[in-house]
Image: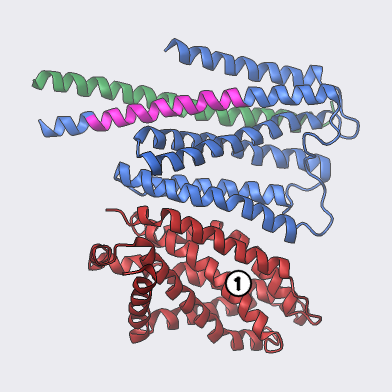
Chain colours: A green, B blue, C red
């Protein structure tokens, strides 16, 4: 197929951007949820 | 949790399905051959990006009017998602243009406006990162967001009427321009897939923002006790 | 007090403050000059190129100068916390903005007029024959720059890194002004001058859009 490199690059980079974007959201999300748990138990202990 | 997984799965399946349709259902284009397949991905991303920025604009207006933090959360989510889609547009465009027309870039109305749009929302996010206090950040960035969105048609008009004079290759023909029926159907399926992906990503980012706010609240409570 | 009288009083204050020291005017004028000269060093234009590129470079220099000149607009108020007193004294926030943007337009226009003779000499472009229309274009463009710039100056004054932030916010927004002003000025100062009324109309539309936006949302920028 002519221009296969270009097509491949376009779709790969395109999906790559969305994938990386989603991964950063997911990672920060799980970090924050761990933080919420930590804070909740810390507050629970103080009370 | 299950609603999120459902939406995410549907989004991914639709994207994969639309890619399949792009390559195996849509007929081969006469002049450019397989290279034209990039068009479905590229133009559908462009539409989804523009709609994400529109969502951001509406939320900016709603926040200034109602001052509910959730509007600001949707706004920043929509802006980031719109930026992701626009980045894809700006990357896939030149990849398509070089083999097709021999040049990576040209300063025609659509390309230039897309680039300025990208710059404006990068500035929007940068502005947000430089204001600490959440309510102030929300208000000031909402007003900048409104100014930016009002500016976009002016940018497009100025370039279209005063810079698109010398003969330029039509880098991407509009979706309606002589698209054969099967191609049109495949294209609109791609647009649908991209929009579902957009909604999924905005929702995920929104939940992140919501959790972040919860953390701030708990931290303040912890400091108070 | 009515909006008009509020604005007039505030405008008087803005103008008096500046004309006492004239520091904004002089530094902006010299800045435009420096930028124009550096363009010549960078591009080394022929006579024809000067005529074709000169006006565009002039507008670029104006935009750069404006993004620096507009910094003190609200920062000055912050240092002595005069903004809250202003808001108490004047119930209408838009009057504050109106005064500042009219003052900024005047300062910008004055700076441009100061630089115009030097521009004509360095770039070999006669400006006198078309002076009235050139003045109109400079006015409409400067008004647009000032309107957007005053609003964004209020925003960036409340953020960190404001010196770098204001140009970053302002210059993309002013793209339409740069594009249209440059072309209209080039055509006006050409050997066979052409008056691009559509462009002049477009500049006016830009000004109206941003004035309206500032009128609708300005008060929120000054909230405590």
Could you say which quadrant of the image residue C115 lies in? Answer: bottom right
Asked if residue B197 is among those painted magenta in the image, a careful observer would answer: yes
**Chain under disc 1:** C
Instruction: Work out whether residue B94 can be spotted.
Output: yes
* In the rendered image, the vertical position of residue C117 relative to residue C220, given as above or below: below
Instruction: Work out whether residue B83 can be spotted.
Output: no
- Dot 1 crowding, Cα within 10 Å, few <14, some 14–19, many 20+: many
Residue C57: x and y in percent read 63, 73
Which stretch appears magenta?
Answer: B195-217
Taking the image as shown, residue B117 lies to the left or right of residue B68, namely: right
Question: Which residue, given by chain and number where applicable, does mark 1 sit on?
Answer: C59
As drawn, which residue projects farthest toward the front?
Answer: C2
As drawn, which residue projects farthest toward the top?
Answer: B2
Pick the residue in front: B100 or B3.
B3
Pick the residue in front: B110 or C30.
B110
Secondary structure mostly seen in the magenta stretch:
helix
Count the numbered circles shown: 1
Asked if residue B159 is among those painted magenta in the image, a careful observer would answer: no
Residue B3: x and y in percent read 47, 13
Could you say which quadrant of the image residue B95 lies in? Answer: top right
Residue C75: x and y in percent read 32, 66
């Amino acid at each position: 197929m002519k221009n296969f490199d270009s097509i491949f690059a376009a779709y790969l980079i395109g999906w790559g951007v969305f994938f990386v974007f989603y991964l950063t959201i997911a990672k920060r999300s799980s970090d924050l949820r761990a933080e919420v748990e930590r804070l909740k138990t810390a507050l629970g202990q103080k009370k | 949790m299950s609603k999120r997984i459902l939406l995410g799965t549907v989004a991914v399946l639709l994207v994969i399905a639309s890619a399949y349709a792009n390559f195996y259902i849509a007929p081969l284009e006469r002049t450019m051959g397989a290279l034209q397949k990039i068009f479905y991905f590229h133009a559908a991303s462009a539409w989804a990006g523009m709609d994400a920025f529109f969502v951001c604009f509406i939320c900016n207006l709603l926040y200034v009017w109602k001052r509910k933090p959730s509007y600001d959360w949707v706004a920043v989510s929509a802006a980031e998602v719109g930026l992701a889609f626009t980045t894809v547009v700006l990357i896939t465009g030149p990849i398509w243009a070089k083999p097709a027309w021999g040049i990576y870039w040209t300063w025609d109305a659509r390309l230039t406006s897309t680039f300025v749009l990208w710059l404006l929302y990068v500035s929007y996010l940068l502005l947000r990162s430089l204001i600490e206090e959440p309510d102030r950040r929300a208000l000031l960035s909402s007003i900048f967001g409104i100014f930016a969105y009002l500016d976009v048609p002016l940018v497009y008009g100025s370039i279209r009427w005063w810079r698109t004079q010398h003969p330029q290759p039509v880098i991407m023909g509009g979706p309606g321009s002589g698209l054969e029926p099967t191609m049109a159907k495949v294209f609109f399926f791609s647009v649908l897939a991209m929009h579902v992906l957009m909604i999924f990503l905005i929702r995920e980012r929104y939940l992140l923002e919501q959790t972040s706010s919860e953390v701030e609240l708990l931290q303040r409570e912890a400091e108070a006790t | 007090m009515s909006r008009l009288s509020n604005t007039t009083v505030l405008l008087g204050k803005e103008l008096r403050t500046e004309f006492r020291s004239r520091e904004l005017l002089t530094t902006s004028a010299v800045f435009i000059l420096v930028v124009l000269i550096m363009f010549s060093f960078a591009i080394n234009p022929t006579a024809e190129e000067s005529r074709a590129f000169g006006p565009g470079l002039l507008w670029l220099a104006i935009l750069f100068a404006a993004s620096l000149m507009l910094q003190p607009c609200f920062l000055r108020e912050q240092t002595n916390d005069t903004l809250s007193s202003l808001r108490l004294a004047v119930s209408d926030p838009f009057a504050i903005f109106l005064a500042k943007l009219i003052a900024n337009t005047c300062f910008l226009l004055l700076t441009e007029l100061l630089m115009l003779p030097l521009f004509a000499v360095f770039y070999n472009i006669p400006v006198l024959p078309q002076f009235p229309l050139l003045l109109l274009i400079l006015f409409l463009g400067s008004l647009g720059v000032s309107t957007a710039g005053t609003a964004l100056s209020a925003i960036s004054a409340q953020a960190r890194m404001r010196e770098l932030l204001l140009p970053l916010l302002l210059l993309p927004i002013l793209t339409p002004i740069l594009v249209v002003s440059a072309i209209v000025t080039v055509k006006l100062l050409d050997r066979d001058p052409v008056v691009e009324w559509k462009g002049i109309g477009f500049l006016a539309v830009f000004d109206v859009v941003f004035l309206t936006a500032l009128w609708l949302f300005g008060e929120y920028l000054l909230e405590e």
